[in-house]
Amino acid sequence: MNSTTSIAVVGAGPYGLSLASHLAARGVAFRIFGPPMDMWRAHMPKGMLMKSDGFACDLYDPERRFTLRKFCADRGIAYEDTGLPVRLDTFVDYGTAFQRALVPGLTEQPVNRITNVPDGFRVEITGGESVTARAVVVATGICYCAHIPQELGHLPPERCTHSSAHHELSEFAGRKVIVVGGGASAT
């Protein structure tokens, strides 16, 4: 199946979903692809607390109707703008609810390939669909930027992995682990 749109958004995390809500509000033809909140759901440590305060964990719709504060209030979840860490599972549930309410046309299949074509880009989706878009916004998150230093690249995956490969950290219980790096992934 082939279709055409103005903008293709690749990635359905906080940035992709926020952008899609703005495009929808402005009546811009777009398609958004990928499992909602996948990086946060499958690649962040289970039980993690968000590094950012509550006010900074919002996804952004143009009218600011779907804030984390409102989501938590509607569900009886403790929330403070500052000083009370946001649980990962709360953030994922909030993002998923945001998607259902404001970006219902999401295509959950991931993108396999993007190529230049005369009218813009061809976006090939898992399952065979192809979409031609004038512009493509890539909002895939940090998992696609995982980097293992060359000096460690020869080690087998059971000995050396990127933090994004681990949702369940209990596998490290009782083991000695070295964390290399000092950025967000290492933290």
Image (cartoon, rainbow, N blue to C red):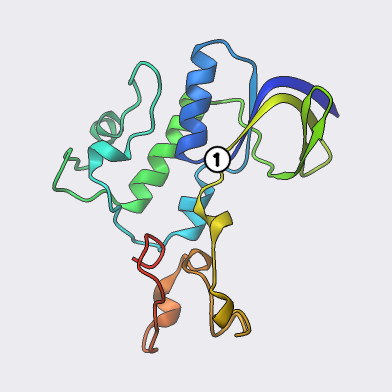
- Image spot of residue 147 (x, y percent): 54, 66
Q: Quadrant of residue 34?
A: top right
- Image spot of residue 165 (x, y percent): 53, 67
Left or right: residue 29 compared with residue 124 = left
- Image spot of residue 136 (x, y percent): 65, 31
Q: Quadrant of residue 35?
A: top right
Which residue is more in the foreground, 96 or 151?
151
Q: Quadrant of residue 74?
A: top left
> Which residue extends farthest left?
83
Q: Which residue is mark 1?
A: 139
Q: Amino acid at mark 1?
A: Ala
Which residue is more in the foreground, 180 or 96?
180
Q: How many marks?
A: 1
- The relative height of residue 47 versus residue 160 in the rendered view (above or below) is above
Which residue is more in the foreground, 135 or 2?
135
Q: Residues within 10 Å of mark 1 (few under 14, many from 20)?
A: some
For the point 44% across and 34% down, the residue is: 97
